[in-house]
Image (spheres, grey):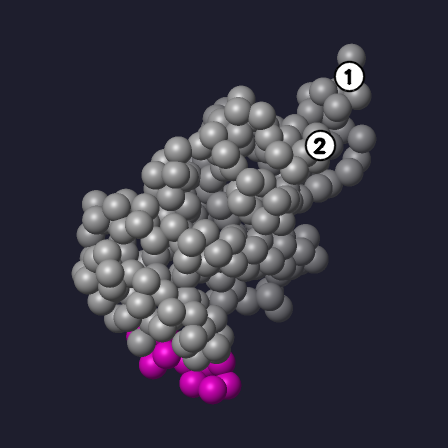
């Protein structure tokens, strides 16, 4: 048997985080037993093992379907290790998924990809309120990796949506105001959102040509972030 396929087959079910208390994670617990989730995680690991910079049409489709469908799944996928039979415990690689593969997708319909990225972004956050002092070492490691993965994903969508304004507006027309606000809140979130002012102004100038409602909601979200964070990141 091909060694790469062998490694795929020895992947087993997700290694669960301990002591999860946040109510937002109740729905995630239900996902862990899903055969679909396990298969999709295995698919992502198989693609990672190949380490190709450009995927075939079939692998692009497998990759995009395997990615999280919402932010709860994003937390589930990237917020914990996966245990192998040989004893290794590995995280999925958000850098490879979102910095290497995502910008090089060729066969995936742009509208579908835009919808997928927006759905992952809705209700996205950096889970700032969790108390690290009450966690064991594994849980701290999981949270640290999840925060890194969230930062990677945030940066990847900033690059993507700044370059795909027309398609973004077409997709966002079907979202209600709260959903659009949620997207922009995640897009611009930072302990120091004033650092995004130049990016915000440039993006605002691009979007106003296509959709005033989306642009106004962008401004509303960004100004709210500014009002909530002072110069010390609070």
Q: Which residue corresponds to the image point at 60% horizontal and 30% vertical from the top-left? A: 55
Q: Which residue is mark 1?
A: 2
How crowded pointer 2 is (Cα within 10 Å; few <14, some 14-19, many 20+) is rated as few
Label 1 SS: loop
Q: Secondary structure at mark 2?
A: helix
In this rendering, the count of numbered labels is 2
Q: Residue furthest bottom?
A: 231
The answer to whether one can see residue 80 in this image is no
Please determine whether, in this image, residue 14 is positioned above or below residue 162.
above
Q: CA distance from mark 1 to mark 2?
A: 12 Å
Bounds of the magenta segment: 224-234
Q: Residue at x 50, y 86 (%)?
A: 232
- Percent from the top left, x then y, of residue 103? 53, 45
**Height in image: 69 above or below 203?**
above
Q: Nearer the viewer, residue 49 or 167?
A: 167
Residue 12's mark? Answer: none
Q: Quadrant of the N terminus?
A: top right
Above or below — where is 175 with respect to 4?
below
Image point (48%, 56%), residue name: 159
Residue 171: percent from the left, percent from the top? 28, 45
Tell me which corner region of the image, top left, top right, bottom left or bottom right, holds residue 14. Answer: top right
Q: Is residue 233 visible?
A: yes
Left or right placement of residue 164 versus residue 156 in this view: left
Mark 1 or 2 closer to N-term? 1
- Which residue is denoted by mark 2 in the rendering? 49
Residue 127 counted in the magenta span = no
Q: Is 233 included in the stretch rendered in magenta?
A: yes
The image quarter in which residue 104 lies = top right
* Residue 161 vertical placement versus 28 (above, below): below
* Residue 213 image offset from top left, x and y in percent: 19, 61
Residue at the image position 62 percent from the left and 68 percent from the top: 133
């Amino acid at each position: 048997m091909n060694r790469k396929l062998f490694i795929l087959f020895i992947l087993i079910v997700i290694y669960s985080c301990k002591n999860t208390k946040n109510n937002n994670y109740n729905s995630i617990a239900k996902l862990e037993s899903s055969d679909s989730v396990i298969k999709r995680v295995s698919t992502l690991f198989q693609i990672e093992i190949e380490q190709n910079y450009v995927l075939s049409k079939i692998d692009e489709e497998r990759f995009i379907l395997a990615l999280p469908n919402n932010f709860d799944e994003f937390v589930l996928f990237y917020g914990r290790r996966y245990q192998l039979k040989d004893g290794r415990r590995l995280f999925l690689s958000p850098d490879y998924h979102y910095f290497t593969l995502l910008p090089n997708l060729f066969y995936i319909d742009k509208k579908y990809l835009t919808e997928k990225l927006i759905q992952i972004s809705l209700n996205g956050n950096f889970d700032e309120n969790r108390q690290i002092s009450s966690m064991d070492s594994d849980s701290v490691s999981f949270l640290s990796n999840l925060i890194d993965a969230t930062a990677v994903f945030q940066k990847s969508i900033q690059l993507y949506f700044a370059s795909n304004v027309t398609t973004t507006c077409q997709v966002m027309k079907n979202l209600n105001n709260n959903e659009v606000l949620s997207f922009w809140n995640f897009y611009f979130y930072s302990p120091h959102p004033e650092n995004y002012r130049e990016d915000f102004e440039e993006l605002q100038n691009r979007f106003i040509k296509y959709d005033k409602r989306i642009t106004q909601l962008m401004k509303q979200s960004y100004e709210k972030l500014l009002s909530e964070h002072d110069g010390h990141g609070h």
